[in-house]
């Protein structure tokens, strides 16, 4: 049991030293990944072009809807 308590105290001391170091150096943590694997998205440009194409297509559909003439006579519909 005393051996385990000693081990815990040692681990706590090491942890405290690490925390003290972080606090002294403003917690500068290097969490960036400069690997080329993560530097760019392989399909980014293709997805961007596809989104632009879809947006243009949707705009054309909206224009056609806005310019469409009604297909029923609302006066006749109200009579019925």
Image: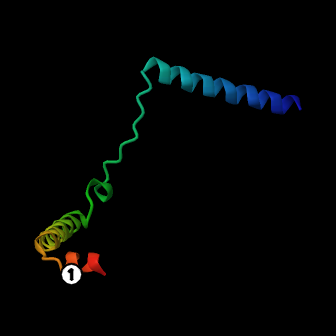
Element on which disc 1 rests: loop
Residue that protrudes farthest toward the top in the picture = 24
61 up-or-down from 20: above or below: below
State the residue in front, 54 or 41: 54
**Residue at the (27%, 54%) spot, across then down:** 39
State the quadrant of the C terminus.
Answer: bottom left
62 up-or-down from 30: above or below: below
State the residue in front, 12 or 32: 32
Residue 52 location, x and y as percent?
16, 66
Relative side of 13 to 21, left or right: right
Quarter-wise, where is residue 49 in the image?
Answer: bottom left
Quarter-wise, where is residue 38 in the image?
Answer: bottom left
Relative side of 38 to 17, left or right: left
Residue 6 location, x and y as percent?
79, 27
Which residue is disc 1 drawn over?
A: 72
Q: How is the image coloured?
A: rainbow
**Residue at the (27%, 75%) spot, across then down:** 78
State the residue in front, 16 or 74: 74
Q: Residues within 10 Å of mark 1 (few under 14, many from 20)?
A: few
Q: How many marks?
A: 1
**Residue at the (25%, 57%) spot, across then down:** 40
Residue 73 location, x and y as percent?
19, 80
State the residue in front, 49 or 74: 74
State the quadrant of the N terminus.
Answer: top right
């Amino acid at each position: 049991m005393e051996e385990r308590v000693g081990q815990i105290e040692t681990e706590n001391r090491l942890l405290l030293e690490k925390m003290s170091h972080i606090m002294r150096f403003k917690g500068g943590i290097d969490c960036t990944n400069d690997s080329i694997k993560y530097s760019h998205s392989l399909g980014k440009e293709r997805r961007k072009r596809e989104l632009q194409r879809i947006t243009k297509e949707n705009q054309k559909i909206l224009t056609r809807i806005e310019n469409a003439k009604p297909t029923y006579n609302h006066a006749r519909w109200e009579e019925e």
